[in-house]
Amino acid sequence: MKKKIVSAVLCLSMAAALLAGCGSSSSTTADTAEETTEAETEEEVAEEEAEAVEETEEVAEESEEAAEVTTVTEGVLTMGTNAAFPPYEYYDDADEIVGIDAEIAEALAEKLGLTLEIVDMDFSSIITSVQSGKIDVGIAGMTVTEDRLENVNFTDSYATGIQVIIVPEGSEITSVDDLSNEDILIGVQEGTTGHTYCSDDYGEDRVIAYTNGATAVQALLQGKVDCVVIDEQPALSYVEANEGLEILETEYVVEDYAIAVSKDNEALLDALNTALAELIEDGTVQSILDTYITAE
Ligand code: GLN
């Protein structure tokens, strides 16, 4: 944008200079002194005009800049996620990261005039990467919690998550109350709310943390843990993809998903909230959710 404005100003100054030139060559009858004065006057006027134009452009530029945001890489919205969390983020057959979060991020980036770049990382690294300025946003089916709010800002919520319990079919664990059984090992994803709640409620000794949902479910299939506590939508995907698993009817915790943004980038938070409100208002967010989540 800056470049465009600079070149517009240059063109205008050139046009002004040409006009000034025309003025002096047309005054061939005037004596030298007069011609010089006239030329200077015309040049001055042209210069003043050019300056006035420049000032107006600068004001326009300033107000535009107020709406513009600073990102880690200029012109790019860098999103951190953990792409083992279907249908929010996962790899498709073409090895691209797709899903609800990827699509919402794409729509937000477009509104902000930025190109989206997705970085796949452990879920537990997302908040620190936002804080250290490695990524602009964490969009990862991430629950808003008091603890996280101490380290990052969150946008308004765009979806609801529910912590559920996956067990092998026919398991003795039939409700959330059974998790109190001292013999039970609970699989979770490291650094997630499921990890925190289970550690708080049942003690760290009985909670085994895996780097992502896929490995936690793998451990369940191998009998290394007795159940997995994870968000409902990925749970549904994992149960559908693997024989012999089921989700207990009891919900453990209901939560709000939002986008994590650095506390040092209020402008980005504001711009994202404005864009998100528009995308919620015009039905884009709902239609993205509906594409991936079919009502039962
Ligand atoms: N909603 C959970 C959390 O924020 C899990 C998110 C995830 O694993 N991607 O901790």
Image (cartoon, helix red, strand yellow):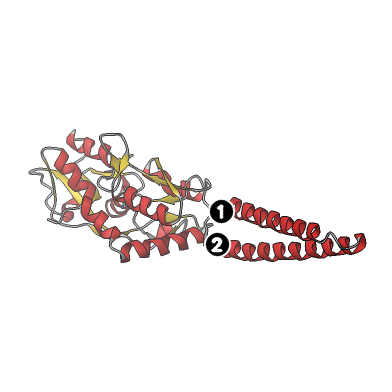
Q: Quadrant of residue 143?
A: bottom left
Disc 1 marks which residue? 1
Disc 2 marks which residue? 64
Residue 202 left/right relative to 175: right
In the image, residue 218 lies at what x, y percent?
A: 22, 35
Q: Quadrant of residue 57?
A: bottom right
Which residue occupies the extreme left position in the image?
170
* Foreground residue among 250 and 237: 237
Residue at left 19%, top 44%?
237
Which residue occupies the extreme front position in the image?
29
Quadrant (top left, top right, bottom left, bottom right) of the C terminus: bottom left
- Whether label 2 touches label 1, CB < 8 Å: yes
Depth-wise, is mark 2 or mark 1 nearer the camera?
A: 1
Which amino acid type is marked by label 1?
A: Met
Among numbered discs 2 and 1, the one appearing first in the sequence? 1
The answer to whether residue 126 of the structure is visible from this angle is: yes
The answer to whether residue 232 of the structure is visible from this angle is: no
